[in-house]
Image (cartoon, helix red, strand yellow):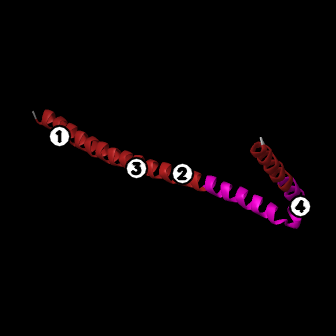
Amino acid sequence: MSVIAEIIDTLENKIGKLFLKIQSLEKNNQDLRSELKNTAVLSQNQSKEIEELKTQVETLKIANALLGSDDNKRDTKLKINSIIREIDYCIAQLSD
């Protein structure tokens, strides 16, 4: 009988250890899922910020071109010509 009792005690100890390990792994899994969600939110926010910054850069390039900086003289001339064509088109539409 004592051999069976030892086997049962050993099994109980092993089952207890496995149960604790399962709980630990579940907590770890939950923590990792939470971290993944936070990282996804952070990534999404950074993507939005990148898009906003790209838009701002384009806006600044256009504003700089319209102000006639030395670096963008050609772009400035092209932009002014484009605006003049749009104005001429609007005037033509209003004349009709």
Q: Amino acid at mark 2?
A: Ser
Mark 2, residues whose alpha carbon is within 10 Å: few (<14), some, or many (≥20)?
few
Range of residues picked out in magenta? 50-79
Residue visible at 80% across and 44% down? 92
Q: In the rendering, at what x and y percent does residue 37 appear?
A: 44, 48
Mark 1, residues whose alpha carbon is within 10 Å: few (<14), some, or many (≥20)?
few
Q: Are marks 2 and 4 in contact (CB under 8 Å)?
A: no
Indicate whether residue 67 is drawn in magenta: yes
Tell which tag, 2 or 4, sits nearer the viewer: 4
Separation of residues labelled 2 and 3 (CA atoms): 14 Å
Q: Quadrant of residue 66?
A: bottom right
Q: Residue 73: which disc?
A: 4
Instruction: Tell which circle, 2 or 4, labels the residue nearer the N-terminal end.
Output: 2
Q: Nearer the viewer, residue 57 or 7?
A: 57
Residue beneath label 2, please?
A: 43
Separation of residues labelled 1 and 2 (CA atoms): 50 Å
Separation of residues labelled 2 and 4 (CA atoms): 38 Å
Residue beneath label 1, please?
A: 9
Quadrant location, the C terminus = top right
Q: Amino acid at mark 3?
A: Ser
Separation of residues labelled 4 and 1 (CA atoms): 87 Å
Residue visible at 78% across and 64% down? 64
Q: Quadrant of residue 22?
A: top left
Q: Residue 34: which disc?
A: 3
Q: Amino acid at mark 1?
A: Asp
Q: Nearer the viewer, residue 6 or 74?
A: 74
Q: In the rendering, at what x and y percent does residue 47 appear?
A: 58, 51
Q: Amino acid at mark 4?
A: Lys
Tell which tag, 4 or 1, sits nearer the viewer: 4
Separation of residues labelled 4 and 3 (CA atoms): 52 Å
Instruction: Tell which circle, 4 or 1, labels the residue nearer the N-terminal end.
Output: 1
